[in-house]
Amino acid sequence: MADKDAIAKQVYDNAVSNVAASQAQVESARAALVTANTNLSRSTIRAPFSGTIGISQVRLGALVNPGTTLLNTLSSTSPIAIEFQVNEKDISKFAQMQSSHSSSDLSLLLPDGSTYEGKGSITTIDRAVDPATGTIKIRATFPNNANALRAGMNITMNVSTTSATEEIVVPYKAVFEQLGVFNLYAVNDSSKAEIRQVKLGIKAGDKIVIKEGVKDGEKIVVDGAMNVQNGVKVVDAATAAQQAAKGAPKGK
């Protein structure tokens, strides 16, 4: 009708304006629907990975602020990551373990003293060495289907290793620390205790490698080292038992 001038120009312009306004209202309603769906989806918190959730940090009805209030913490359960520091001199050894994907070189000792059944593997080596400590952070992963390992737990990591040369190994309880220095008592040719400052190597179970301070074949004090003083005469358990037997009165 507008093409044939059958209606007034004003009527046509009003009709076009009304259509445009209606279309704008439709678009506005669609935007409001998207916003409502977004807000609805944000009202449900979905975990980015499977794991174990902790005790809630807020109570029902508490005031919370988006982006600042911690609601809860989620931890990965299995596999679980173990982080530890190693000396920069050992980086090549751990890098080789990572590239070989070996799962038999790492084992764990739990806080109660028991050995963890699962074996771990090196997954990540940090990008840089800490210049303050000369160490680098390494992450290993362990299977944890029984949930025996928990986030934040302090455990002992054992790393299987071999040495190209023979080394001196002593019971760890023979070593004691004084003012940041490690010592032990060696027994000299006069059967007297002689304090020795030693440099320690790696620890293997209840024993530890001695890098410096003790020679092969020397005797050391193992039991009761904290009660021994430098220069006192000491005897081994077998000799002490024989002396006690000789000095005991004979029955009639």
Image (cartoon, grey):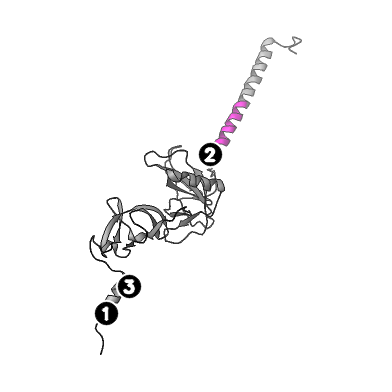
CA gap, disc 3 and disc 1:
12 Å
Q: Is residue 71 visible from the viewing direction of this image?
A: no
Q: Give the range drawn in magenta.
A: 27-42
Please tell me in which quadrant of the rendered image residue 186 appears: bottom left
CA gap, disc 2 and disc 1:
86 Å
The residue pinned by badge 2 equals 42
Q: Which of marks 2 and 1 is nearer the N terminus?
A: 2
Identified by mark 3, the residue type is Ala
Q: Nearer the viewer, residue 67 or 102?
A: 102
Identified by mark 2, the residue type is Arg
Which residue is at 30% across, 75% downward? 241
On the image, the x and y values in percent for residue 150 come to 46, 53
Q: In the drawing, does residue 125 fall left or right of residue 18?
A: left
Residue 112, above or below 83 = below
Q: Nearer the viewer, residue 137 or 56?
A: 137
Neighbor class of circle 2 (other Cα within 10 Å; few <14, some 14-19, many 20+) is: few
The residue pinned by badge 1 equals 246
Q: In the drawing, does residue 163 fall left or right of residue 49?
A: left
CA gap, disc 2 and disc 3:
75 Å
Helix, strand or loop under label 3: helix
On the image, the x and y values in percent for residue 153 come to 43, 53
Would you say residue 234 sits in the magenta stretch?
A: no
On the image, the x and y values in percent for residue 222 come to 33, 63
Label ID, residue 161:
none
Helix, strand or loop under label 1: helix
Which residue is at 64% across, 23% downward? 23
